[in-house]
Image (cartoon, rainbow, N blue to C red):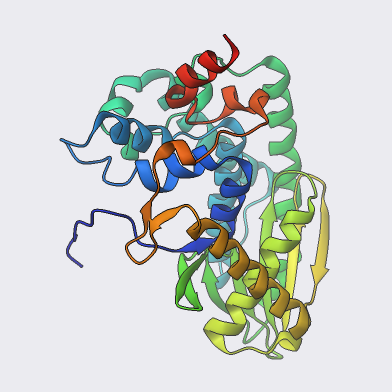
Amino acid sequence: MAYVRTEYPQWSWSFSRQQIFQSCRRRYYYNYYASHNGWEFDAPQESRLAYRLKQLGNIYTALGNGVHETAQSLVARVMEGRKLPDVAEIEEEIRRHLRRVWKSSQENREQFLIRPRRVDMLREFYYGTGVSDDVVERINQRIVQTAEALAECPVWAELSRKDAQVVACEQFDTVEIAGTPVYAVPDLIYKTAGGQWVIVDWKTGEEAEENRDQVALYVLFVREKYGASPEQITARLEYLNLKSSMEMRFTPEELQAVEKNALASMEEMKGLLSDPALNVPRPKEEFALTEAREQCPWCNFYELCRGELEASVS
């Protein structure tokens, strides 16, 4: 499909978009509006910088990406009937991803400034804060724990059974709610031989109530996208770092509440648009900085907000 330039981004909604909106309106503005068209050579400076900063990762997201890439390769192996690697191989695959991102962040700053979409860069290196020894130790522990948990995950035995079918794995997709495209990227969706639908979400962090909200949205997605009834769908949170699993089912009433909450979130976001039909944002100043200012130095967009933050305390 040929690229078609648009002056403003397409209106859409997702769980991650809602999280950013709730955490900081200014971060939301930079992430979804100021960065749009920032890849263009003659884009305004703020737009180019917002686009660049949007591409930054951090050491924890790098771990998560490495684990998800590894899990995706394991799914492919199982479906091809190949033998699964042992724990040491799984651990090495995760570490290989992290080493690549770490090396790129140390050596490729100039390339990142020119082509940020194509170059891995950790915000810890971009901003020069570095990664503390304590964090490195924590990441190393999590790599070991997540590799062991992935190797022992019951998903592999279930996928190996006759007539099991992978429906989607790390597949970017949408459904519509009240005319709004809703984006969802479930880690894994598969059907069992008995016709049950299973959604798997691998986590490398701690348990959180918002994770339940996220998989509830995935259940709604599977219902709308594939026509499965809620009684047929099981959502499974795999907390790899904790070596624990949580299975959930959602009633039609609970899914109705999920949809209602999404619609309420959309309306709140639209309140910061000057033209909802074209998805035109109001002026940047109407997107308030977070009250939790202690979090600002750890935000990707700190470079854009630093002057305003310093002026507010002087």
Locate residue 279: give its quadrant: bottom left
Horizontal and vertical percent for residue 302? 50, 25
Where is residue 8, by image quadrant? bottom left
Q: Position of residue 55 (x, y in %)?
A: 41, 38
Q: Quadrant of the N terminus?
A: bottom left
Q: Nearer the viewer, residue 134 or 308?
A: 308
206 versus 251 height, above or below:
above
Residue drawn where x is 60% and y is 13% of the image: 313
Image coords of residue 131 (percent x, y):
61, 19
Q: Is residue 312 left or right of residue 197?
A: left
Image x and y of residue 298, in percent: 59, 26
Residue 278 as seen in the image, left or right of residue 290: left
Q: Is residue 283 above or below residue 132?
A: below
In the rendered image, the residue lying farthest to the top is 314
- In the rendered view, would you say 28 is above or below 10? above
Examine the rendered structure and indicate whether residue 17 appears above or below residue 235. above
